[in-house]
Image (cartoon, rainbow, N blue to C red):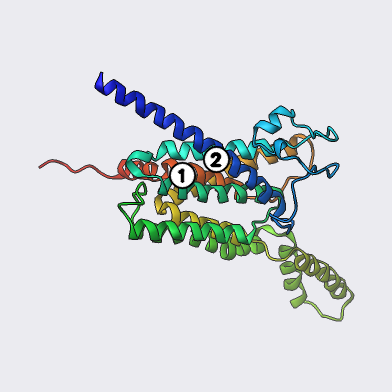
Amino acid sequence: MFYTDIDSSLLVYYIGVYIMVFLFGISIGSFLNVCIFRLPAGESLTKKNSHCMTCGTPIKWYDLIPVFSWLFLRGKCRACGSKISGRYILVESLTGIIFTLTFMRFDVIEQGLIYPALLCLFLAGVIVIGFEDYDTQEMTVSVLVYLVLVATATRVLTTLLPDTVRGCKDTVIDCFIGLFSVSVPFLIFGFVLTPIIYKFFVSEDHKSARKIKARLKKMNPNSAEAKKLQKELAKHLAAIKETGSVFGFGMGDIILMAAGGLMLGWKAAVVAAFIAIVAGAIYSFVLKFKAAENDEESIKAFAFGPFLAIGLGLASFFGTQLMDWYISFLTVPEIPM
């Protein structure tokens, strides 16, 4: 009976904590919506009040209750009746769920409140980056800096106060390696290998320009055919200049994964990158399939940030454990003597 009472009280405690965390999470999600819509446009987060995007009517405080107001209004503006994007409730609900799962994954009694709270702050920034990149194919520098600062603060606190900031099992060395484990390969692939591969094996303008230059070397530059080829070469060079450099990963992707590795450790960072690459490849295949089905031109580029955000979100819960399992699976067991 004594243990039953303890278990019941603990259950009530945990349920209370999770409800509070969820409500706090959807409130933060409401603010994240503001960041997602305003930061790419260069708008202030504080000076402009929330308003209807269609009629411009300021939204009353009782219509700003996260999740519940959208459901009560059935996704429509109270003033003009225009449809309110489902993105609002999606981001709010997603943030609340992620915050709750974080506190479920890291037991607050055994591991304290500080580490799961810091992880929630980090994942909030990841959510903003993911949706921003999906909308604009750009990542706001201020949010990337925020992620680096949160990751750095977490590492400093877990190092200086290991008995207080519990929950993170990665060592300082693991996280320092994580800073470079994915970001450096992304940097090399994105800014060195991809431009070379594109220039010599993919770009039709580059291929044509090289062939024309090779032919011109063997011809009289004053001949009619040479002058014709020179005009054609000029067209290809202009197209190359207009296209500009082609990179596989942007600096935003690289900084995001550097922050992720510093926050979660190299094992989780590698798992996050693997998840992102697989998910991105599947998405690319779907895009090409739909384009071919509709006789449309295939989409050559898409935002990779959302997939990195998904990878970091999943890896923050089980990335290290999954990598440990994979390493143990590859390890040859010792033969008893």
Q: Are marks 2 and 1 in contact (CB under 8 Å)?
A: no
Image quadrant holding the N terminus, namely top left
Amino acid under disc 1: Ala
Residue on which disc 2 sits: 24
Q: Residue at x 41, y 38 (%)?
A: 105
Q: Tag 2: Cα neighbours inside 10 Å, few (<14), some, or many (≥20)? A: some
Q: Tag 1: Cα neighbours inside 10 Å, few (<14), some, or many (≥20)? A: many
Amino acid under disc 2: Phe
Q: Nearer the viewer, residue 46 or 201?
A: 46
Q: Residue at x 22, y 42 (%)?
A: 333
Give the SS element for disc 1: helix
Location of residue 205 by image quarter: bottom right
Give the label on residue 315, or none.
Answer: 1
Location of residue 89 by image quarter: top right
Instruction: Give the x, y percent position of residue 104.
Output: 43, 36
Instruction: Give the x, y percent position of residue 156.
Output: 39, 61
Instruction: Give the x, y percent position of residue 179.
Output: 45, 60
Q: Residue at x 79, y 77 (%)?
A: 219
Image quadrant holding the C terminus, namely top left
Q: Earlier in the sequence, mark 2 or mark 1?
A: 2
Instruction: Give the x, y percent position of residue 299.
Output: 72, 47
Residue at the limit of the structure toward the front, as seen here: 61
Give the SS element for disc 2: helix
Location of residue 66 by image quarter: top right
Q: Residue at x 74, y 56 (%)?
A: 41
Disc 2 versus disc 1: distance between alpha carbons? 23 Å
> Is any atom of residue 281 visible in this view?
no
